[in-house]
Amino acid sequence: MGRSYVIGEYSEKYLKKLKGEERFGTTGILLGQITSAKTYIIFAARTPLKDHAELPPENPDEMNASDIDWVSEHARQIARMLPGGILVLGVFLIRPSKMTKEEAHDIFRKLATAVEAAVAKERLWNFTEDETAERVVLQVYADSKKMKVQAYDLHNPQTPIKLLECKSSSLTSPWQIVEATINVDVNIPVPVAAERQFDKDSLKGLNNWAKQIMQSSYLINGQFKEPYSLLGEGSKKKATAEVQFLTAPVMIIDGEVDALIEDCGSSVVVKGTVRCRAYLHGSKSKVKDAIQELKRDVLNTVFIRCQMVFEEQVLNKNVEGDSSSLKAPHRIFASVLPSGVAFCDYGFADEGNKEQEERYKELLDYELNPAQLDRTEEAMLEEMGTEGADALGRKEDLVTTETGFKYKDAQELPKEPEEEQERSIDEVASSFDIAFADTYSDASAEFACGVAAAAGVGVIAVAVSVIYFGNFIGASA
């Protein structure tokens, strides 16, 4: 039996509205969920027009590289607003009557490939072999009532685009929700070459942490459930499932690790607490799928906030400034669909409802009511105290040496236990202690002498987000 494709009533009405406004040539992004048997299209958002134009270009078949980059950047920004379980599924086009089939397919190939590449740049995880590589391309015809949904194979871009049968549905049947509160405490050495371009490659230190999260065990509402059991099994009523992740050191298999020595000019300290959420459609979702989507949301929200902090630094031209304290953005959810599925945005401390409304309008073409915003998810963490921030911010604990940098004297460091036990990352994270080894060469000692504590998602119970970004501490070797 083949894969089924379902389009939600909201998306269908939105696309017909764009056609009714004669916005022919409009491109946009499709959002939804992919399961083992079905693909759900739950939301569509047109790409903002360039240069404040009032209508899309008359000849979309003549899209140049900058136009494609514009669409893919829109997709990247939207991907940041998605909770676990919701993905960028593909693209749509309000197709002009004069456009040929070949021209439409050529545009779809270019757009679908560019969109997936842009979104993948901010992922710390990969799709499994069992997950479909198909993405959706949708055409709304100018001269008929037809709405054609087709599948595009990401692994084989040159294969013909398949025509699909797509059913319409309200998609308001129960969506199961899983949530988790995660404490993060990661130190990331930043290679000299990557200090000015903050991307996935410059956050290689997050990879081991990401593996820990993806390999972690779990408890659901305090109990273990078999991976292939139903998520809602044993529950008398629909309720949000609270997940607790239990991490252990990443298993290293012989032959899998290649040593790499790089000069590091600074390091990034990611430390704090985040709130994560994933949605699954229907009542037959399996535990393994829910846990996988929630873990992916953990990785997404941490990486996104790190990226946003650095972007804010670059925007304010403060990359080489004095040590200072910055707050990473809060995650603010907003229910935008009748089904109750919520998207999210990230707001800095100086931003209010107006900024949230503007971003929803620009990126999602959605008129947001301030009453839809839910700031309580992470605001409650802020009320728990500021002890973690004070601990990270005490510069008197920082000591420089001739060969490197360390937080505390060696005798003050806690002794390592004989066996590192599996621990919950829902527990309050311990203070961060680290000391650089004294094996740096003279050439690299200059870089080892300092640390720029930066980026992150907060410090323990402080609004998920106190970040320190500083220049080097200590003298050159």
Image: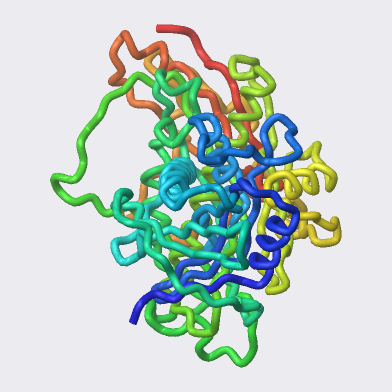
Task: Give the number of marks.
Answer: 0
* Residue drawn at (57%, 28%) of the image: 397
In the rendering, at what x and y percent does residue 31 appear?
Answer: 57, 59
In the image, residue 235 above or below residue 94: below
Position of the N terminus by quadrant: bottom left
Instruction: Kindly tell me whether residue 124 is visible in this rendering.
Output: no
Which image quadrant is residue 113 in?
top left
In the rendering, at what x and y percent does residue 240 appear?
Answer: 63, 75
In the rendering, at what x and y percent does residue 163 appear?
Answer: 41, 66
In this image, 350 relative to 238: left or right?
right
In front: 249, or 108? 108
* Residue drawn at (68%, 57%) of the image: 19
* Residue drawn at (56%, 38%) of the image: 73
Position of the C terminus by quadrant: top left
In front: 344, or 183? 344
In front: 131, or 389? 131
* Residue drawn at (43%, 42%) of the image: 110
In this image, 201 relative to 352: left or right?
left
Instruction: Kindly tell me whether residue 180 is visible in this rendering.
Output: yes
In the rendering, at what x and y percent does residue 61 appear?
Answer: 51, 40
In front: 465, or 147? 147
Which image quadrant is residue 402 in?
top left
In the image, residue 348 above or below residue 334: above
Indicate the colouring scheme: rainbow
